[in-house]
Image (cartoon, coloured by chain):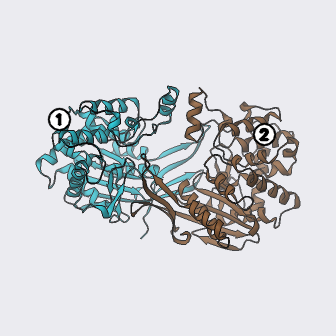
Chain colours: A brown, B cyan
Amino acid sequence: MSNPVLVEVTRGSMVESRHRGIVAVVDGDGGKVMSLGDVETPVFPRSAVKSMQALPLVETGAADRYGFGEKELALACSSHSGEPEHMRLAGDIVARAGLGEADFECGCHWSSQQDVLIAQARAGDKPNQLGNNCSGKHAGFLCLACHAGVDHHGYVGYDHFVQQSVRDVMADLTGTSLGHDNCGTDGCSIPTYAAPLDRIAHGFARMATGTGLGPDRARAATRLMSACMAEPYYVAGTGRACTALMSMAPGRIFAKTGAEGVFCATVPEKGLGIALKCEDGSTRGAEAMIGAVFAKLFEADEELSSRLADWSTKTMKNWNGIEVGQIRPVGELG
Amino acid sequence: MSNPVLVEVTRGSMVESRHRGIVAVVDGDGGKVMSLGDVETPVFPRSAVKSMQALPLVETGAADRYGFGEKELALACSSHSGEPEHMRLAGDIVARAGLGEADFECGCHWSSQQDVLIAQARAGDKPNQLGNNCSGKHAGFLCLACHAGVDHHGYVGYDHFVQQSVRDVMADLTGTSLGHDNCGTDGCSIPTYAAPLDRIAHGFARMATGTGLGPDRARAATRLMSACMAEPYYVAGTGRACTALMSMAPGRIFAKTGAEGVFCATVPEKGLGIALKCEDGSTRGAEAMIGAVFAKLFEADEELSSRLADWSTKTMKNWNGIEVGQIRPVGELG
């Protein structure tokens, strides 16, 4: 089966490129609300499951011990753009546990935002680990290890307490077996586990509804997703999709992207979990898809649905500012 | 018909993302040597046809008048990375026609190479039109207009002498009708015309063989492609695919990429033209495809074929330098 074309990129009056996708929307009991493409193929959710990966931080009490408010929790679930405020807060969090930039194990890169990168270069800065898009998650990992009294060195390793804790939570939420067989290494060096998209979507529906979760886990899930929805700038950054979507409907949309064209999301008021993957791994394809999925799910709220549909279609301009084409949802999402 | 998956992106032992593609390899008489996917769908070749777009510059004598050697001709066919030498030469060329940076109509952007961008930012530079990846082509356009005694203002416009000349040459080479119906606006503001991939591949086979071309056009085509093969740094830049491929087999491979996952190429010694498009528009997919196509076409030369196959498979490392996966040709190109 070929996954369906869900996004077209146009130029003039013609279609120039096409993005295929897989979409699973599931309720708390695992009932399928929307299913496009092969939702049973294992997919690496990458950074789209950072809110799941942050559950041990909250459940163990580490977040409370180190004073995590909503901004800190949102940053722990983030793939941020490495803007100065993101970097400052990541450093501030680990300082509360007596640690510093050198204790991170995520690696360095420049900001993903060109204007921030240029400002950093002009200021004579060099990339450091606080600027890694995953530094918020890693700050959470470091706090989790310190709170548990475990040596934090090697916390990115498969067998370390931190990754064992993450793996256990994710296996529980998705109802899948996670281990070496379906494991890869993520950009920030932690293990990432492939699971069928419909299982991942179900995991998010359970986070949104608490269905079948113990009370501590259900509370932690609500607390983390509420923090992201309350402080969406800390989940991504200026002009980014996750930030824009959650800002558009405060408290009604939770959305988190992952590398290689993934989005995981929930609509809390409907008790739905969403997971999608752009087959080719492109961000522009995945962003158009998630916007269109939300537009469909909120059809009853015409005003919001229309804003989401508008957002999901991007007009492309060239270097002279001339409109040259569009990125737009089509087919089942059109 | 779905276009076939030709490239896989792996992580650990699993496939993470997939790229579908269309490939046409054609000889000078239009005979199909390789045909994958729907080669009859119109595709915007974008910058991959810059060598065709430079033919009027050579055929009219403008290139000789303004002292175009191999480096200048290669730059006229280029999508360069905006490195200092590319910018210097683009400025030098138009100065010979009494023009300057302000006469370009391609727009400004920063270098596509992060280290160059950072060096420019540190030096206090701002983007200018010489740094536009298309500035070499536009330098050629400006010289074409000046040599013809035509007002160069508005040379990017559909009805300007320059774009009429380009359109006529491309329609002749591809044997297709090019006009408003299949026209879009390119990143640098000139018209780009969609044509079936097999017709574009045939156009390049004719450039490589001279089949059915007048002697002036055949000579100009050979001169341009020879210049690109002799000076591949001026066609792209440090670490770029076109530069790497042409450097790997001097005089035996001509290759030029275009935005949205396009490559056009020739194998002069075999009289073949190649055009391919990654369905989703991704560069990494198109690069793996063109490397694999060359590896197949040079199968009889085991040493070169093996180097091309190696090049077409990329090992991906994360921010800590750990190998996490591969981009590799599969299926008909595996």
Where residue A135 sits in the image (x, y, percent)?
Answer: 70, 40
The chain carrying label 2 is A
- On screen, residue B197 versus residue B316, left or right, reads left
Q: Quick check: can you spot residue B229? A: yes
User: According to the image, label 1 marks what residue?
Assistant: B64
Where residue B306 sits in the image (x, y, percent)?
Answer: 38, 45
Where residue B89 sits in the image (x, y, percent)?
Answer: 32, 31
Q: Quick check: can you spot residue B251? A: no
- On screen, residue A327 versus residue A259, left or right, reads left
- On screen, residue A69 versus residue B100, left or right, reads right
The chain carrying label 1 is B
In the picture, the quarter occupied by the N terminus of chain B is bottom left
| Marks 1 & 2, CB-CB < 8 Å contact | no
* Marks 1, 2: nearer the viewer: 1
In the picture, the quarter occupied by the C terminus of chain B is bottom left
Which residue does the image show at 44% across and 68% down from the upper left? B2
Q: Are marks 1 and 2 on the same chain?
A: no
Q: Which of A129 and A80 is in front in this view?
A: A80
Which structural element holds mark 2? Answer: helix
Q: Is residue A247 above or below residue A185?
A: below
Which structural element holds mark 1? Answer: helix
Q: Distance between the residues labelled 1 and 2?
A: 66 Å
User: According to the image, label 2 marks what residue?
Assistant: A142
Where residue A295 sits in the image (x, y, percent)?
Answer: 62, 67
Query: Pointer 2: residues within 10 angstroms few (<14), some, or many (20+)?
Result: many
Q: Which of A319 and B14 is in front in this view?
A: A319
The amino acid sitting under disc 2 is Leu
